[in-house]
Amino acid sequence: MENLIIVGAGPAGISAALYAARANLDPLVINNGIGALEKAEKIENYYGLPHPVTGKELFENGIAQAKALGVRVLDAQVLGVSGFDTFQVKTTEGDFESISVILATGSKRKKPGIPGLQEFEGKGVSYCAVCDAFFYRGKNVAVLGNSDFALHEAQTLLATAGSVTIYTDGMEPEFSTKPDLPVNTMKIQAIEGVKTVSGLRLEPEVSIQENGENVSSFAAADGIFVAMGTAGSSEMARQMGAALTEKGNIKVNDQMESTIPGLFAAGDCTGGLLQVAKAVADGAQAGISAGKYVRSRKK
């Protein structure tokens, strides 16, 4: 049993880890990638930098700093978090149980720019297999994605849906294990339907022609679950039943605690100023608050 698992190794996650480590919590940080920092070519508006650094440099320096304090950092993709009294964190490197969890993976994932996707949200398009699988009992569903997160969502749906197919939207599959269900790698042209989703329009294959013209393919589906990239903090929180704001960020109090006791969030996933300085402050508060929570549970 872990005292504290921190999901995310960016400024918010590492800041939380530093404070938790100094409080003797022995936190475990799960590094699921650099995230938005990768796009930062030059950072010069943060305290203590004698010269500009790239986002990648700041990210790597943060992890090195945490490791120097003895913080354990696991490189893995988080597939989901569940639980209430204690938390279960499912990753590509195994499953872990923890008294407390801090979500710090950055802002919510960008939605793929597929025509029809936004129009059919709540009308056949979902972003949470655990939340909405019940509504698709015995029906044919599609999962959009090419990573272990998509595979995990698809496997969750297998228990209730009539059939499940993964669509990678033209991207190469990046599954760590061979899927035991169909995978379609064609590019998606659009999500189609009338009042609700009826399926996906796929790009034409060169090998399929009619009167000299390419013919597009239609794949029928009653529901479409979006699982592009890796699971974001907001997606994990929503799957657990934590409240989100109107903008889809995790709702937290001034202690950075969500509406679920022991589940904290920090950084861009809570909204507000999307800056390193704010993320670090959030992480510090979350680390301190998680420490108080863990100690109260052990009394």
Image (cartoon, helix red, strand yellow):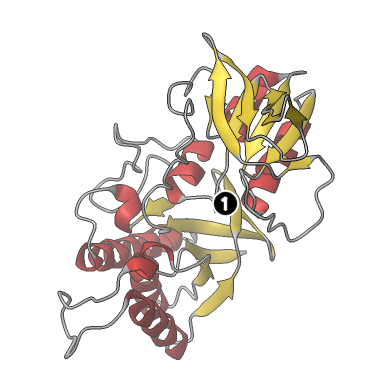
Q: Quarter-wise, where is residue 251 in the image?
A: top left
Locate residue 144, reporting x and y percent: 61, 39
Q: Quadrant of the N terminus?
A: bottom right
The residue nearer to you, when weighing 285 against 177, is 177
Query: In the rendered structure, which amino acid carries the disc numbered 1?
Result: Phe
Left or right of 265 in this view: 114: right
- The residue positioned 47% from the left and 85% from the top of the image is 67
Vertical placement of residue 144 versus 295, above or below: above
Locate residue 235, reporting x and y percent: 48, 42
Q: Of all residues shown, which one is farthest toward the top?
A: 195
Q: Quarter-wise, where is residue 204 in the image?
A: top right
Vertical placement of residue 129 versus 86, above or below: above
Left or right of 98 in this view: 219: right
Q: Of all residues shown, which one is farthest toward the front?
A: 212
The residue nearer to you, when weighing 293 against 101, is 101
Locate residue 205, reporting x and y percent: 71, 38
- Residue 157 visible from this viewpoint: yes
Would you name the residue on which mark 1 appears? Answer: 87
- The residue positioned 74% from the left and 35% from the top of the image is 165
Locate residue 104, reporting x and y percent: 40, 59
Vertical placement of residue 2 versus 242, above or below: below
Task: Classify 10 Å Cα crowding around label 1: few (below 14), some (14-19), many (20 and above).
Answer: many
